[in-house]
Image (cartoon, helix red, strand yellow):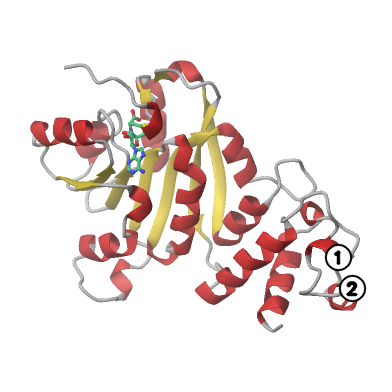
């Protein structure tokens, strides 16, 4: 039975075995790992992952695809039907680590992998960022343009809110680019695979909230100066005290400057 790709679920199925192999050798899944795959689809990554793992959790929204996977009765596979945007990664990490309550074993244990549906790539990364203390690493395929934003440096066109948040929480390593021909149907844009690992000095949840609020203000209007974007929150003196030029634009600030701003906003 053929499956007709559904655009609303961002379905572009991987068909190039060499890309799948490269992705898996970058990830190095091993027996005993706690792994969750987002959007298994027709199983392009799922089956080779299962060949290397004793257990694998997958989250899939498309009922037809869920039924196809269920029919295969794959050993070690647990299917979580539903929207990954509502999925509780923290509970899964605990469950896979065999724990009902918070304890050190579940922390930084979960490995997230997937060829992500492009329509939810960025909001999903934000959700993963919010539960980073459960995550060991992330290996995902995204639009190349999003991967460029993830690891962009200050002062470049791609640098923005996503870059600041993700680089504050994760070590971001772009791995390789994947052409549209690797998928069926082919997407209109280039894709890329990225690895992200929580940083040892990742901000705690309070600081992360402050960083989210601070970057929302700083990048509210990319063409405006920081003086304008922080109006009503921080005045010129407060910005200067943080060694930040009120006339600068957000995309020119480095990460330590954003962290100084976030700390200051927490206290105002
Ligand atoms: N992993 C397969 C592959 O590489 O061929 C499919 C990748 S396809 C780009 C994205 C997959 O995510 C599809 O199976 C789609 O149904 C699923 N998906 C889309 N939106 C989802 C959501 N909100 N929650 C869970 N799965 C979703």
The residue identified by callout 2 is: 236
The residue identified by callout 1 is: 227
Left or right: 175 as drawn, with respect to 2? right
Instruction: Please state, as top left, top right, bottom left or bottom right, where the N terminus lies in the image.
Output: top left
Instruction: Estimate how packed mark 2 is, as few (under 14), some (14 to 19) or many (20 or more) residues with alpha carbons within 10 Å.
Output: some
Quadrant holding ligand 1?
Answer: top left
> Any atom of ligand 1 within 8 Å of the CB at mark 1?
no
Q: Which mark is residue 14?
A: none
The extreme front residue here reads: 232
- Image coords of residue 94 (percent x, y): 26, 66
Residue at image point 86% right, 58% down = 225
Foreground residue among 76 and 116: 116
Examine the rendered structure and indicate whether residue 122 appears above or below residue 203.
above
Examine the rendered structure and indicate whether residue 143 appears above or below residue 262.
above
Examine the rendered structure and indicate whether residue 247 appears above or below residue 142.
below
Number of numbered discs visible in the structure rendering: 2
Residue 132 falls in image quadrant: bottom left
The extreme bottom residue here reads: 267
Left or right: 99 as drawn, with respect to 177? left
Left or right: 141 as drawn, with respect to 255? left
Foreground residue among 131 and 216: 216
Instruction: Estimate how packed mark 1 is, as few (under 14), some (14 to 19) or many (20 or more) residues with alpha carbons within 10 Å.
Output: many
Residue at image point 71% right, 63% down = 217
Foreground residue among 242 and 27: 242
Residue 148 falls in image quadrant: top right
| Label 2: which secondary element | helix
Q: Which comes sooner in the sequence, label 2 or label 1?
A: 1
Q: Are marks 2 and 1 in contact (CB under 8 Å)?
A: yes
Q: CA distance from mark 2 to mark 1?
A: 6 Å
Residue at image point 91% right, 60% down = 247
| Label 1: which secondary element | helix
């Amino acid at each position: 039975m053929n499956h007709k790709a559904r655009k609303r679920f961002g379905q572009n199925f991987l068909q190039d075995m060499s890309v799948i192999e490269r992705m898996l050798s970058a990830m190095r899944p091993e027996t005993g790992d706690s792994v969750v795959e987002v959007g298994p689809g027709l199983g392009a990554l799922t089956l080779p992952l299962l060949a290397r793992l004793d257990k694998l959790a997958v989250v899939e929204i498309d009922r037809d695809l869920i039924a196809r996977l269920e029919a295969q009765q794959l050993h070690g596979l647990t299917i979580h039907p539903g929207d990954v945007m509502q999925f509780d990664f923290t509970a899964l990490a605990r469950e896979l680590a065999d724990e009902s309550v918070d304890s050190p074993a579940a922390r930084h244990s979960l490995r997230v992998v997937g060829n992500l549906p492009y329509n939810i790539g960025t909001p999903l990364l934000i959700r993963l960022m919010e539960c980073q203390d459960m995550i060991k690493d992330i290996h995902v395929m995204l639009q190349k343009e999003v991967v460029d934003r993830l690891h962009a440096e200050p002062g470049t066109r791609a640098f923005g809110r996503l870059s600041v948040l993700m680089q504050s929480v994760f070590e971001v390593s772009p791995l390789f680019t994947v052409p549209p021909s690797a998928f069926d149907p082919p997407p209109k844009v280039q894709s890329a695979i990225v690895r992200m690992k929580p940083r040892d000095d990742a901000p705690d949840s309070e600081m992360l909230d402050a960083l989210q609020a601070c970057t929302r203000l700083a990048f509210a209007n990319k063409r405006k100066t920081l003086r304008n974007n922080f109006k009503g929150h921080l005045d010129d003196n407060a910005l200067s005290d943080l060694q930040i030029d009120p006339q600068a634009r957000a995309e020119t600030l480095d990460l330590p400057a954003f962290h100084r701003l976030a700390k200051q906003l927490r206290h105002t």
